[in-house]
Every structure is written in structure tokens, then in C-alpha cells.
Image (cartoon, grey):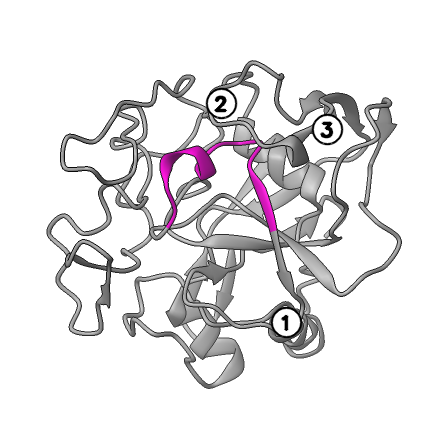
Amino acid sequence: MLTVAGVHQRLRWIPPGPFTQGSPEAEVGRFDTEGPARPVTLTAGLWLGETPVTQALWQAVMGDNPSRFPDPRRPVEQVSWDDAQRMLARLRAAHGCPAALPTEAQWEAACRAGTRTATWADDLTLQADPDGGEARAPVLDPIAWHLGNSAQGFDHPNGHGLLDGRVAGTRAVGLKPPNPWGLYDMLGNVWEWCQDPWQDTYEGLADVDPMGAARGPLRVVRGGSWLHPPRMIRAAARSAHPRAGRNLTVGLRLAVPATA
């Protein structure tokens, strides 16, 4: 448990071991950037935030709140990768917590939580929206906030207008059930920064503790968000943003090494 100025962040154990990173070619909603799927081994376990970093925790550490949807229970957003690094540096220097961002491989292993389907609950079955909008994926509604359900009952005054006239945004963390390893909102709500620079595809070879491209201007984000369609809300789905970019769909989750 990490506590800063009375704000608590529970951490969950992510065990070491092998898993398959990426998606099979037949997975519904798949993008080419998710492959080729490859066996990956994580040689060390880690502690991962039970939820994305909340606005309450960000405020306690950084003294401000850049979020579009102010609410201490909601995930912080509109923070860049560089902003995240400043928060992590402050946690290390002022609070003795050696936190980092998870690598892309660590993030995906934690999201899958020992499962092998497109989400930890099941594979997606996309259905046409009778109103002409994005395809629906019924398996997602119980476990994640995404474009198809994020407007339902939305009650924040700073809501973002969608193309169909609905208003939506982030939700308080932990409203959907956790995955089998006790992690909330790994899919949907906000994208989460990873440590890795972006690479367009995997090389398809078995790897140990991979770290992405050697360098580059883009950083990986994972998990999808309240503003993205179902095909983006899968364990293997991946995207990237400029490291200095700030977006109302992107936040972060803390990773702490096992030796901490």
C-alpha cells in the first residue's frame, strides 16, 4: 500500500513467468501492430497499482490537477509521458517509493491475468449498432468503460460531446469488476502510459523482459478508453502518443519492482 498525504494506492502482485504477447491473426478486431504474437518471459514479478492513478493521488504528489473531468475518484488524465516521469521522480525523491511505468510486456501480462482471450472475460463478438454507430461488444459492457457505454448515466458537468450528440467522459475508478489478479480498469476508462518507446510490430521471436524500440518520439499507451470503440478495448490492442502530448483519454498506472 502506498500512502501520500492520506491518499491510499493499493498495489497488486504480478507474478513472473511466460505469456503470449500480441494477438492471433484470427482475433476479432485485431490490428497488424499487435503481431506477430510471440512468447515472452518476465523474469521478475512486480507490484502494479490496483487502479489507474487517481486525481486524488496525483494532487497529493504533484499539488495540481490537470484533468478535464475534475473528481478525486476519477483517473487523472491530460498528463503527458514526461509529466508521468516527473510524478515518478517525486515519488522516489520525496516519498521513497521506487515507482515506474510498467513496460508494455508487463502491462499486457497483468491485463491478461493468466487468460488468453481478447479480454480477461472472453473474446469479443462485435454486433452492428442498430442506431448506425460503432459496433457493440456485449462482453465489454460489464467490465469496461468504452465508447459504447461511457455516456450511459454520465453526470459530470465537463462532459465531452460525442458525434451522436451524447455526452461522455471518464468514470470513477473501480466501478467495474477487477480482472482475476485484482486489477481494476485495465481495459477502458483511460489509456495508460507504458515506459516503452513505440515500435510498429513485434519481431515474432521469443523474448525475455522486452522493452520495445531503442528510441523514438512516441511512447506506448495501452488499454483503450471511454472514447474508443470496442476493438480498441482488448488486451493486445496498442497505440502511441508523443511523449509530451496531453490527452483527455490518457492517464497512468504505477509499477513498483518486487525488491521495493
Quadrant of the rendered structure where residue 68 is?
bottom left
Q: Secondary structure at mark 3?
A: loop
Sequence-first disc among 1 and 3: 3
Closer-to-camera residue (62/81) = 81
What's the residue at 62%, 44% (across, down)? Answer: 47
Would you say the residues marked 1 and 3 are in contact, meaning their CB atoms lie under 8 Å apart? no
Is residue 233 or residue 90 the one in the foreground? Answer: 233
For the point 62% across and 40% down, the residue is 107
- The amino acid on which the numbered mark 3 sits, given as a three-letter code, is Pro
Is any atom of residue 75 visible in this view? yes
All told, the count of numbered labels is 3
Q: Earlier in the sequence, mark 2 or mark 1?
A: 1
Q: Which residues are magenta?
A: 228-239
Residue placed most toward the observer, 203 or 223: 203
Mark 2: give few (<14), some (14-19) or many (20+) Cα within 10 Å. Answer: many
Residue at the disc numbered 3: 16
Q: Is residue 238 magenta?
A: yes
Above or below: residue 155 compared with residue 58: above
The amino acid beneath tag 1 is Leu
Q: Are marks 2 and 3 in contact (CB under 8 Å)?
A: no
Residue name at image x 30 percent, y 63 percent: 73
Extreme residue toward the bottom, this view: 63
Is the residue 111 above or below the residue 104 in the image?
above
| Residue 5 location (% of width, % of height) | 45, 76
Picture disc at residue 91? 1
Asked if residue 14 can be seen in this view, the reply is no
> Given contact means CB atoms under 8 Å apart, are the residues at marks 2 and 1 in contact?
no
Task: Please identify, in this view, whether the residue under mark 2 or under mark 3 is nearer the observer.
Answer: 2
Q: CA distance from mark 2 to mark 3?
A: 21 Å
**SS for callout 2:** loop
Residue at 47% in and 86% down: 63
Q: Which mark is residue 118?
A: 2
